[in-house]
Image (spheres, rainbow, N blue to C red):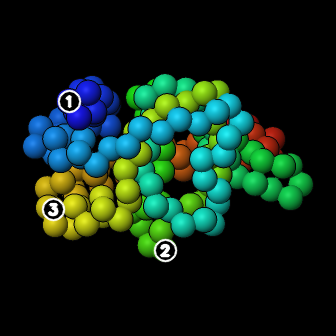
Amino acid sequence: MENFEQLLAAHSFFKGIDAKYISRLAEQATPVSFKAGEYIFHQSEKARQFYLLNEGKVAVEVPTLVHGSITIQTTGQNEILGWSWLFPPYTWHFDARAMEATNALVFDGEWLRGQCEEDHELGYAFMKRISETVVNRLQATRLQLLDVYGIHF
């Protein structure tokens, strides 16, 4: 447990979050590993998890009929994966595939939502941090679309 607290406290997502939340979250953290090429989740599936990536690389992809899967963004060490657990209808908007062996801590999204509802200070901290991730993902998607359609500034 102490090791999970150290991992959380050192992770950029939790920078500045009160230690009492780190301790509570560490109790619910579960380590997971993915092999290179393994899908972590697929678009339209129920979003039930939140991942803190500790090592490895994950491609966030959009499946298309014409171009196959298009990588929108690559995430890796000291980043997060998954924000759809926080917003109805709680389904993934992208696919996520490990590009190399990847280790993470995973949290149950329903439990996290409950914690955020119960403690608005924690909820606000999550919303600020998740919003930053969403904005970054939207910007990456925008740039990818411009690249696909050959639009240059």
Looking at numbered disc 1 in the image, what kind of residue is underneath it? Glu
Which residue is at the front of the view, 151 or 76? 76
Residue at 50 percent across and 62 percent down: it is: 47
Residue at the disc numbered 1: 2
Residue at the disc numbered 2: 89
Find residue 91 and report its horizontal and vertical position in percent.
Answer: 54, 66
At mark 3, the secondary structure is helix
At mark 1, the secondary structure is helix
Looking at numbered disc 2 in the image, what kind of residue is underneath it? Pro
Query: Quarter of the image holding residue 118?
Result: bottom left
Tell which tag, 3 or 1, sits nearer the viewer: 1
Residue at 38 percent across and 59 percent down: it is: 109
Return the disc, 1 or 2, that comes first in the chain's sequence: 1
Find residue 96 and report its horizontal and vertical position in percent.
Answer: 62, 46
Q: Is residue 92 above or below residue 147?
A: below
Return the disc, 3 or 1, that comes first in the chain's sequence: 1
Q: CA distance from mark 1 to mark 2?
A: 34 Å
In the figure, is residue 43 to the left or right of 104? right
Residue at the disc numbered 3: 120
The number of discs equals 3
At mark 2, the secondary structure is loop
In the figure, is residue 115 to the left or right of 47? left
Rate crowding at label 1 as few (under 14), some (14 to 19) or many (20 or more) other CA atoms within 10 Å.
Answer: few
